Amino acid sequence: MKKSSLDLLKIGMFLLGISALILSGIALHAYLRSLNEEPYSLPFYAYCQQGNIIIQANQDLDNISVYDTKQNMFCHFNQIPRTSEELCDVNDVNSTMFVVESPLSKKVVSCYLPEKPLLR
């Protein structure tokens, strides 16, 4: 009786070892597969700073436009090379929301202009 209980213990430990090897193989496969995939990135990033919309290109862009909410165009760029930036001045505009649009993507940018101090 004692010998059979040891055999069951050895078989159980062997099965646990095999399952640990299988799980580590699956985890390694998923990790290596994630390394080969390119991370998703937007074609451009746009933000507002001090009344200017700055457009950073993550890839070569063509026909980029900046509109307000009423579809009035403020800036248009025929081409922005990859890793470059362009600047669109929206200081004198009453609107605070803008749309930066390219054929590949569209982004909404909020631009809160600083209030001018009151002179006393």
Image (cartoon, helix red, strand yellow):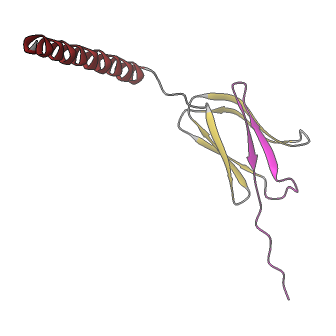
- Compared to residue 36, the image places residue 95 above or below, namely below
* Residue sticking out furthest to the left: 3
Residue 32 image offset from top left, x and y in percent: 34, 20
User: What is the quadrant of residue 112 in the picture?
Assistant: bottom right
User: What is the quadrant of residue 67 in the picture?
Assistant: top right
**Residue at point 92% right, 42% down?**
70
Residue 24 image offset from top left, x and y in percent: 29, 21
Looking at the rendering, the stretch of residues picked out in magenta corresponds to: 91-120
**Residue at point 56% right, 29% down?**
59
In front of the other: 106 or 87: 106
Counting every numbered tag in the picture gives: 0
* Residue 98 included in the magenta stretch of the image: yes
**Residue at point 11% right, 12% down?**
1
* Residue sticking out furthest to the front: 1
**Residue at point 64% right, 29% down?**
61
Q: Would you say the magenta stretch is mainly helix, strand or loop?
A: loop
Residue 62 image offset from top left, x and y in percent: 68, 27
* Residue 85 included in the magenta stretch of the image: no
